[in-house]
Image: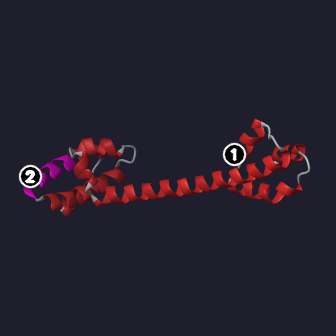
Amino acid sequence: MGLQLIQLIVADEEKAINAAQNKLKRIKIQTDQETAAHWLEWAETILVYKLPRLSREEIQKMLGYNDIELKQTRFYQDVFTEGLQEGIDEGIHEGIQKGEAKVILRQLNRRFSNLHPNTIIQIQQLSSDQLEALADKVFDFTTQNDLDVWLDKI
């Protein structure tokens, strides 16, 4: 079976799709769920690389497997875990950036009373590096105009 699935790599797209569908139908009937999931993982991996323009849902539909069966494959679980970790990392980074902006805005509000709403928005949109640079300059500003001039330069 492994050799037959590896042949999908060299087959043209249409033949690869049909061959994968036929092989996986046979596998579903002839093997237990764990073995079927193993071979589905192989076929899915081959087709993901062979047909990169297709979404996971399109490959799933094409192979005739339902969502639960695909979610049991190691490939799906690895991709899901990577995506989850990226989401967590982005969330942490975004949270730190928002926290930095919040602290700087509190300091600036205390120093200059009421900041202009556009200034607040501009500070909230700064990158982490820009926020760090601003944090170093906060106590150098003597007027809100100094802050505005600094913001215009970046």
Q: x, y percentage for residue 152?
A: 83, 43
In reply to whether residue 109 is colored magenta, the answer given is: no
In the rendered image, is residue 7 in sight? no
Left or right placement of residue 89 versus residue 8 in this view: right
Determine the image quadrant of residue 145.
Answer: top right
Element class at badge 1: helix
Left or right placement of residue 69 versus residue 131 in this view: left
Q: Name the residue under label 1.
A: 124
Check the image and name the residue furthest to the left.
Answer: 30
Q: Mark 2 points at which residue?
A: 29
Q: x, y percentage for residue 51?
A: 35, 47
Say which mark, if any, is on residue 137: none
Magenta stretch: give its range: 19-31
Q: For the N terminus, which image quadrant?
A: bottom left
In reply to whether residue 24 is colored magenta, the answer given is: yes
- Number of marks drawn: 2
Question: In whole angstroms, how far apart are the C-alphas of marks 2 and 1?
Answer: 57 Å
Q: Residue at x 88, y 56 (%)?
A: 140
